[in-house]
Structure formats: structure tokens, C-alpha cells
Amino acid sequence: MFKKHLMIGACAFVLGAGSMAYISQQAQATAQPRAETYRMLELFGDVLELAERQYVTEVDEKKLIEAALEGMLASLDPHSGYLAPDNFDDMQETTKGEYGGLGLEITSEDGVVKIIAPMDGTPADKAGLLPGDYITAVNGQSVLGLPVSEAVKSMRGKPGEKVTLSIAREKADPFDVTLVREVIKQKVVSSRMEGDYGYVRLSTFNEKATDEVTAAIRGLQEKNPKMKGLVFDLRRNPGGLLDQAVGVSDIFLDGGEVVSQRGRDAKDIERYNARSGDMLDGLPLVVLVDNGSASAAEIVAGALQDRKRAELVGLTTFGKGSVQTVIPLRGGSDGAVKLTTARYYTPAGRSIQKTGIEPDLEVAATREQAELIANKAFQFSEASLRNSLDAEEGKSRREAHAPAEAPPATFDEKKDFQLARAIDVLKNGSVMATPKLPKPAPKMAGIVEKVAPQPKK
């Protein structure tokens, strides 16, 4: 008996010694990167001091440090960054839905400012600026290499003042466009009847989104009690607030999951559910999307598609499947950090980061757009941003291809072809039951086979 106890004790001692050795190794492993971090922070101080002492002119130490913070966070992904106090205030004004400017949602790609989407009814929208356009200069001053926050600041100013943007666009010569700054009172929602079918457009997910969509649908129902279905337009909607995405989805869903977000820890899952009660009471619903539909717009589209509540018509969405948390620093007096903290997943468990959500019926808006989609250079999306967060392993965005449908030659392209097809889906009851149009055959170098030159006669 004594020997048995002794052996158990010996085993315990061996295991304990092994554990202590492991813990010691862990402590050393942790200490080494921490020591390297301290060394690099000291290096940062040395470089800052050198710039202060030896740069050709006096430097603004605060601006240098703010630029370093911005660069550090922007190196993580295109949506993380540092917001200086003024920029933090601007962001808060934007989410409230009223501010001065041009009406652009932008990002940065390799130091170049790129348009995600112009907002409906704003100077940028009226000037015909498009998703994927590059802004290279503002009033003749280059914005190449500027943080997004600085580029935004250069475009904002007093209402009534003119601003000239230099634009680079795929397959077009560079051009300048002059806009007049306005107080941007975002027209978040517009609505009307299209025959027997309602149409509601949501341009962004600010603090008013859920209330305004609800009011628009209620107005259509009161004036048209025999409404047969609804088209919900999320094209060129760059997203916005997560709680508003959940609220808008809730309008159409009778309970159940809308979206989940998952952080670094696999156990760190937060789920968002709809309440009971579908405002349309099961009325047929089609959602319009395109490559300008991003973030919160994709949450709504993904939830309604996965839950079989709506079918999607249009183009594959942008593919921004990450969640940013804005963390004020010292109550906002030192600005804030915008940090990517989670990925979001649709009710079916899909992460659409980089890949986007593919529509049930793919429809190009114009014949020209159909040709551009066949050209890989056109594929402006989250996947085209150099530093974007990786997609789930094994997943990738669909490559360049001829879209399933585009306006036939007989269609008046002044009209909205994607909307017309959405209404066709409502009339026929489903995408499957809707007669399909002949697939377009765009004359693009990447699609059409090269024809060998014929010998001269």
C-alpha cells in the first residue's frame, strides 16, 4: 500500500515538474515578444525625436503621432483606423444623418481614395460618380497617400462652396468634376407604387433607417390595401449601423435569427434575433442588390435570403463581412479607435467576407455593365482591397464572367432593368418560375476567343 502511494506521489511530482517547465517556457515565450514590443516602442520614440530635431522645418508632433496611429491601425485591414477628435465628431454627425459635404462613402486602397458608393440625392450622386471611382485630387491638391480621415476633411467645408475632384475611372480617361457642397440631409428612404407592387429604397443604415422604412411601408399599405408584393432596393447602400440592420430585417421576419457575430475566440458568439410579427404578413418580397451593397445591407440581404423570406435580384454584393467597434479614447477627447472586432455570419452560418452574397437571379443594370462584369478589372469589392480580412478558408469570390441577364437591345436603358426583372419575379411567384432572358454575350477580350488573322487575297 505504501509503495502504491509512493508511486502515485512520484507520478504527481513528475507531472508537476513537467507543468512547471512548460509554464516557464510559456513565460519566456511571452516575455520575448513583449521585450521586442518595448524595443520597437523605444525605436518609435527615437524616430520621433530625430524628426523633431533634424527635419528641414519644424514639425507638428501631434500630427506625426496621429499619422502613426492611423498607419498602425490601417495596416490591420481597410476598415480599422484612428479617428482624431474632429474626425470622431464628424463620424457621429454622419450616423445621425445630417452633415455638410458631398455625400460620398469612401475607403482607401494602397493609399488611393476609392468610392464605395455615392449617397442618393447628394452632389456626388447628381454628378454621376460611381462605385469604384478613384479620387486622386481635391481642388488640385493630391490626396494620394492621405489617410481616409484627412481626405474626408479636405472634401468637407462650408455649404455653397465649390469643390473640384479629380477622378480616375476604369476604361476612361481621367477627368475633373466640380460639385457644390451641401448640408447633407440624407434622404434615407424613398417609396412609390410600381403598378400593383410597392417599391421602397433604403440608401444607408443611419439612426433613422428602421423607423423610416417602417413608415414608408405603412404609408404604401394605407394607400394601397391590395398591394401584391414589395421590392426592397438596397443597391449602392454602403451599410452603417448594425442595430439598424437587425431592425430593418425584423420588419420582414417573424422571429428567428438575423445575424451572428463571432470574435477571435470561437466561443465568443453574439446572436441577434427578430421579434415575432412580419409587417408584410408574408406578402412576396424581392430585394435588389449590387456590388455597392455592403456591410449592413448584406446582413439584411443575407438574412432574408437564408430565411427564405425574399429572393435577391441584381449583382453579387460587396463582401464586407466584418464588424467594426468604435472605442472612444478618454471619452472622445482624444478621438477614437475604429477596430475590426468580429466577423458576421448569416442565419445559415455563411461568412460572406470577401465573397459577397450572390443573387438568386443575376441581372446587369445595363449592357455596358454586363461587358464590364466580364472584365476582371471591374470587380470592385472587398476582395479587391489589398489589405482586407481573409475570407473563410477555401472560399473565394466568383471570377469575371458573363452575367446571366442584361437588358436586351430592345429595352430602353433610361428605364431600370433590374427593377423590371424584380417585378417580373413578383408577378411569376419566384425566380424559378420567371422566364429567363437569353444570356448576354459581351464582346470583351477576356471572353471572346481570338480569331486568327485571315490571309490577304
Image (spheres, rainbow, N blue to C red):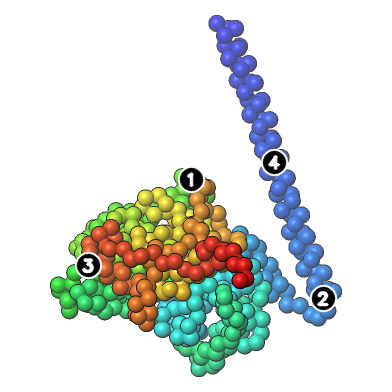
In the image, 276: left or right of 107? Answer: left
Which residue does the numbered mark 4 point to in the structure image?
A: 29
Name the residue nearer the viewer: 82 or 14. Answer: 82
Dot placed on the residue nearer the N-terminal end, 4 or 2: 4
Tag 2 near tag 1, CB within 8 Å? no
Instruction: Please name the residue shown 71% across and 44% down the image.
Output: 31
Q: Are marks 1 and 3 in contact (CB under 8 Å)?
A: no
Per the rendering, the mark at residue 266 is 1
Label 1 neighbourhood size at 10 Å, few (<14), some (14-19), many (20+)? few
Residue farthest to the right, as pictured: 54
| Separation (CA) of disc 3 from disc 4 | 65 Å
Q: Which residue is mark 3?
A: 427
Vertical placement of 259 versus 279: above or below? above
Please name the residue shown 60% across and 7% down the image: 3
Label 4 sits on what residue type? Ala
Answer yes or no: is residue 412 visible: yes
